[in-house]
Amino acid sequence: LNLGILISGRGSNMENILKSIKSKKIPINPAIVISNKVDAPGLKIAEKLGIKTEIIESRGFEGSREAYDKKIIGSLTKYGVTPKNGLVCLAGFMRIISPQFVKKYKNRIINIHPALLPSFPGLNAQKQALEYGVKYSGCTVHFVDSEMDTGPVILQSVVKIKENDTEESLSKRILKEEHKIYPEVVNLFARKKIKVSGRRTIIG
Ligand code: GRF
């Protein structure tokens, strides 16, 4: 099984997944990290960890999701991340995936979102949670479909909100949980422990 990780920025989830694969002996080959941004800090981290990287710039492809995703699929295929033998992790990848890409890699693309979906989808989820005034938020790992943050949920982790929380302090505590559940999902997937039944996933 070959893993492709798609990033746009910092890459802390990517780093954490790559390190967990080694330390926890997750049976998956980290084949390629792809960034849609030339200057994503995560690229350097991946290189340091000895993982192949590619930059596939999305600038200019704003209106043509399918054309851009074809380039991504081309690169994934080159590294063995195929619909038969691949897993694609979105880790701070700031683009919506085309229906064609989703269909081709059915139930093989996963994403992490810093809120308890279906609450607070989209950008600035932690800020949305604070502004709404909820007492609990958290993070969600889910399969990706072609809308934003709507696919079947795989794992969630709850974080209690404190009265003096700021966007920064809450994001930090949520990120800690992200770093627990994302590698766990990669491990479950690699060991074929995740089944999808309609909107539900069955684990184990
Ligand atoms: C994380 O908060 C993740 O939940 C969201 O984007 C952020 C990416 O952070 N999708 P990093 O690049 O993994 O550090």
Image (spheres, rainbow, N blue to C red):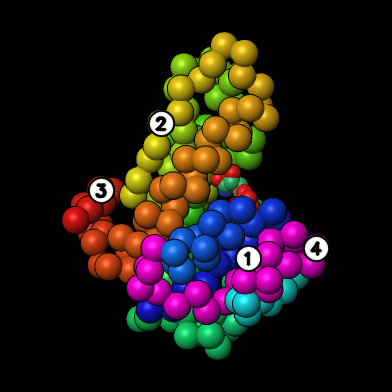
* x and y, in percent, of residue 155 in the image: 35, 46
Q: Distance between the residues labelled 1 and 4?
A: 21 Å
Identity of the residue drawn at 44% across and 52% down: 182
Give residue 200's mark: 3
* x and y, in percent, of residue 50 in the image: 62, 77
Q: Mark 4 points at which residue?
A: 39
Mark 2 and mark 4 lie on one chain; the one further toward the N terminus is 4
In the figure, residue 186 lies in which quadrant? bottom left
Q: Name the residue under label 2.
A: 158
Circle 1 residues within 10 Å: few <14, some 14–19, many ≥20: some
Q: Is residue 58 visible?
A: no
Q: How far apart are marks 3 and 2 (CA)?
A: 19 Å
Amino acid carrying mark 3 in the image: Arg
Q: Is residue 97 above or below residue 51?
A: above
Magenta-colored span: 24-49
Identity of the residue drawn at 59% across and 65% down: 6
Query: Mark 2 CB in 8 Å range of ligand 1?
Result: no
Identity of the residue drawn at 61% across and 53% down: 12
Q: Mark 1 points at which residue?
A: 65
Report the mark closest to the observer, 3 or 4.
4
